[in-house]
Image (tube, rainbow, N blue to C red):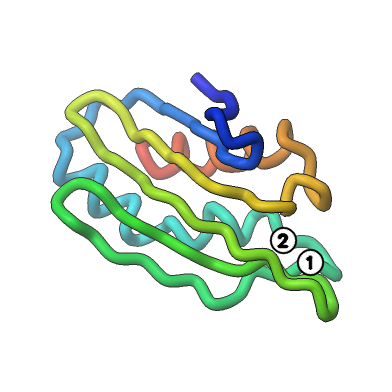
Amino acid sequence: MTGYCRNRHVMRVAISHSKSKAEVIQAVDRAMGDVFQGLAMPPLTIVDAQKSWNGSVMTFSLTAQMGFLRNPISGTVEVTDRDVIIDADLGIFNRFVSQAKVQATIESKVRGLLT
């Protein structure tokens, strides 16, 4: 399931899994930075990535940068017994990269983590 929430810049991606919650949390923790790095293409770069966990919810932030223009991106990744739910506030990032590309990249990277 993918789509936008009420805020037009917030995107939600939910991906089902069949692994244990602990396994999925470890996989997400190891590779979440790679998920957004896959969207970067010159001259767009991803910088200042940060993450923290509170139980099964990871809060993250990073900055998409193109020249002097900087766009903060933030959100959460919730791991449930059956799903990985990513809510991300993309800000104006979707003006540089299409919504379809963002969703496809996130889904592909997260599914790759879960196999």
Q: In this view, does 18 lie above or below 29?
A: above
Outermost residue, front side: 6
The residue sitting at 72% across, 38% down in the picture is 101
The residues bearing labels 2 and 1 have C-alpha atoms spaced at a distance of 5 Å
Label 2 Cα neighbours within 10 Å, binned few <14 / some 14-19 / many ≥20? some
Residue 11 location, quadrant: top right
Which type of secondary structure does the marked residue at label 1 adopt?
strand
Q: Mark 1 points at which residue?
A: 44
The residue sitting at 41% across, 60% down in the picture is 60
Q: Which amino acid does label 1 sit on?
A: Leu
Find residue 29 and report its horizontal and vertical position in percent.
31, 58
Residue 40 location, quadrant: bottom right
- Is there a contact, CB below 8 Å, between mark 2 and mark 1? yes
Res 40 label? 2
Q: Which amino acid does label 2 sit on?
A: Ala
Q: In this view, does 40 lie to the left or right of 47?
A: right
Which type of secondary structure does the marked residue at label 2 adopt?
loop
Q: Is residue 88 left or right of residue 26?
A: right
The residue sitting at 75% across, 45% down in the picture is 94
Q: In this view, does 91 lie to the left or right of 114?
A: right
Residue 17 location, quadrant: top left
The quarter of the image holding the C terminus is: top left
Find residue 3 and report its horizontal and vertical position in percent.
58, 24
Viewer-proximal residue among 38 and 5: 5
Find residue 57 and report its horizontal and vertical position in percent.
25, 48
Viewer-proximal residue among 4 and 32: 4
Q: Can residue 108 be seen in this view?
A: no
Res 14 label? none
Q: Is residue 95 left or right of residue 45?
A: right
Q: Is residue 37 above or below residue 6?
A: below
* Total number of numbered discs in the rendering: 2
